[in-house]
Image (cartoon, helix red, strand yellow):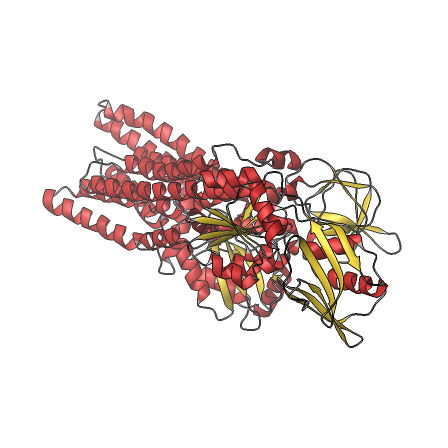
Amino acid sequence: MSCCVPTAETVELSQQGGIETDDEALLTLSRKLGDGTRQLEFAVPDAHCASCIRSIETGLDTLRQVKSARVNLSKRRVRVVFDPELGHPAELARAIRSSGYHTYVLDPSADEDGDTELRELVKALAVAGFAAGNIMLFSVSVWSGANEATRDLFHWISAIIALPAIAYAGQPFFRSAWRAVRVGRTNMDVPITIGVILATALSLYETVNSGRHAYFDASATLLFFLLAGRTLDYLMRERARSAITNLARIAPRGATRVHEDGRREYLPLREIEPGMVLELRAGERVPVDSEVTSESASFDTSIVNGESAPRAVPPGEEVMAGANNLGGVVQMIARKRSEDSLLARMVALMEAAEGAKTKRRRIADRAAAVYAPIVHTIAILTFLGWGVLTGDWHNALLNAVAVLIITCPCALALAVPIVHVVAAGKLFEGGVLMKDGAALERAAEADSVAFDKTGTLTIGRPRLFDFHVEGSEAEAVAVALARASTHPLSQAIVRALHPGDIAVTGLREQPGLGVEAMIDGARWRLGSRTWCGLGEGDGDTTAVWLSCDGVVRATFRFEDEVRADARDAVRQIAALGLPIRLLSGDAAQPVAAVAAKVGITTARARMLPEDKVADVEHGHTMMVGDGINDAPALRAAHVSMAPSTAADIGRSAADFVFTGGQLGAVPLVIGTARRAASIVNQNLVLAIGYNAVAVPLAISGHVTPLVAAIAMSSSSIIVVANALRLRIGRSSWPMRTQTLQEAHA
C-alpha cells in the first residue's frame, strides 16, 4: 500500500543505540497537538488482521509516554499520541518491533512513491501463477498413467520449478509469520505459512522417496489463490477508501512564498507558517487556510461547501485550504499551519472512522484475538485424530493443512471497519464529515431529531431591519461588544453599524445570554432582555438589547431567512419515522413562525443552554446546531451534527460536520447509518457463518488445501464486496466523487 512505501522522506530508525539521534528525527517529524503532546505515524506493512492490531496497540500502551495508539488496518499505519516529556520517542518504534512488526516513521509531507505493496503482490501472484500452470502440465501427465521413471522425472522437474517459486511468491506470508513468531506472537499468516511449508515438504519427501503422489501443483496453486485473494482484497479496500485517497491527493504539496523584499520562494507544505505571504497562480489550490489580500479573487470552493460555481472572495475574507484559484495571480496571508487547516481536518476525520472502537468492532476484535491458539489446537487435534483413527498420517497431514488455511479471521476483522470506511466515503461525497465509526453507530440508534433555529434552520445571517440607539457612545459600545461574539445576531450588528473608537476591558461572553464589559466604571451588556436586566418582554420578534448599569440604551430587531431546503429535510426525516422538535433561545413568536414554515409541530422558545441539554438527554436524540450556546447540547446528545459554518466549539462538539449548509445532510446521515448498521450485522453473520461451516468440513476431510485457500480468500472478498453495497444509491448532495477526481485531474 502506498502509505507504507519507504521513500527519501521516511526515517528508518536504528535497531539499537542512537536514542538521542532517533529522538531528534522523530520530534522533527511529529505534529504538535497543542497540549504538550505530539503525534507520529508509523508504517506497519506487516499488519493484516485483528491480532496484528491487538499486538501493536498492546505493545505501545505499555509505554508511559503513550497517550493513545490506533492502528489503521487498511492503510497499514499506526497513529501514536505521546508526551515526549515522559519518555524517549524512539521507544515507540522499538515497541512496535518488539511486537513482531517491521516499521518506519512517516514524514507527513512526503510524496507517495507509487504503490509498492500492490506491485509486490502482483509480481508474487504472477510467479505463483506461472509455476502453478507449468507444474500442472507435468501433473496431468503423471495422473494420466506415466511410468515410474517418467513420474519421478516429472516430480523432480516440478520440484525445480516449485521450490524457488514458492520461496519468492510466499514472501508476503513468510516474512509476516516469522516476525510474529520470533517475538512469541501469532497472526493469520502463521497458519498459512505452516500449511504451505507442510504441503511443500510433504511433496519433496514423496519426490525423494519416489512416491506416487507429489503436491507441488497444490502448493503453488494454493499460493496463487491466496495471493489472488489478498490482491483483490487490497484493491477492494482501496476502492472503499477512494474518497479519502482522492481528498488527500487534492492537497497541494507546497506554495510560493513572497518575501518582504519581493523575492519569491517555493516552500513545501509543512514549512508554511501563519503570517507568511503566499502567491497563487490560476489553477493552483490554496495550501493552508488563508486570508485573501488581492482584489478580484475568485475561487472554486466545492471541496469546502459543495458549490462548484465560482465564488468571489473580497480582500480580508478567509479562504479554506483546497479551494481552487480560478482567476489570475492572487496573494494571501497564511492563517494556519497545514495540519490545522480545513483540508487536513477533513482527511483526519474520515480516517478516524476506520479506527473507532465501536461496540460491534470490540466484539469482532475479541473473537479474532483468540483465533490463532484455537485454530492451531484444532489443526493438531485433526492431525492426531485422523492419524490415530485411520493410520493414514499422510491424509491426516493434508486435513490438518486444510484446517490451518481455511480458518481465517480476516472476514471477521474486516466486517466492521470496512463498512465504516465505505460509509465515511459516501457521506463525504454527500458533504458530510464523520468523526468516527462510533458516531455512525449512534446515528443509526437515533429516535428523534432536535434542531436549533438560528444558523441551522435559518441561513444564519440575520438582517438588522429596525434599531434604536441613544447616542454615538451607545452605538460604538454596541459594535465593540458585538465584535467579541460569534453569534449571528452580533455579527449582523457589526455589519450594519459603524465602528467607533472606544476602549473596552473585561469582555466576557455568556453563551445563550450575551456579552458584557466594563467601560469607564460602568457595566455594559449586549444580549437578551433578561441578561440586560430589563425584565421579560412580549417576545414578538427576534431582538437584542444594549444596557448600561441596567438602563436600556439601544434596541435591535432582526429577521432571518429560512433555509430553502429546510422543509424538504424535515419531511425526509419524518419519513424515516423520527419525531422532530425545534429548540431555540429566541423569542416565542419568531420560533413559532420558523417551525410553521418548515413543518415542525413541536417548538420550544427562550431556552438556555442548560435547558437544551436537559431536553436532548432524553432518549437517543440527534441534535443539529451551530452556535457556541449549542455546544453543551451537541455534546450531551446521543449523536450530533453541525454545519461547517458553526463556531469552532460547535464543530468540535459535533459528531458530524456538513460542509455545504444544506439540511439534506441530516436524513442522509441517518439513512446511511441505518444501512451501515444493517450491513455490519450481515458481515458479522457472514464471517461467523463461514467459519461455522468451513471448519467442520475441513476437520471431516471434505476440503483439500487448495479448496481451503479459495474459500478463505473468498470470505474476505465477500465481506468487502458486501460493504461496497453501501455506495449504491444516489446521494442528495451536489458534491460527488467525480468532483474530487476532476479536481485532482
Numbered marks: total: 0
Q: Residue furthest top?
A: 144
Residue in front for this viewpoint, 68 or 470: 470
Judged left or right of residue 40, residue 290 is right
Residue in front for this viewpoint, 173 or 709: 709
Residue in front for this viewpoint, 404 or 567: 567
The image position of residue 82, as x and y in percent, is 54, 66
Q: Residue furthest front?
A: 538
Q: Is residue 274 above or below residue 375?
A: below
Q: Residue furthest bottom?
A: 521
Judged left or right of residue 360, residue 330 is right
Considering the image in quadrants, where does the C terminus appear?
top right
The image position of residue 566, as x and y in percent, is 58, 41
Within the image, what quadrant is residue 711 found in? top left
Judged left or right of residue 621, residue 392 is left
Q: Residue at x 50, y 66 (%)?
A: 67
The image position of residue 102, as x and y in percent, is 48, 55
Residue in front for this viewpoint, 678 or 323: 678
Res. 238 visible in picture: no
Res. 276 visible in picture: yes
The image position of residue 64, as x and y in percent, is 48, 71
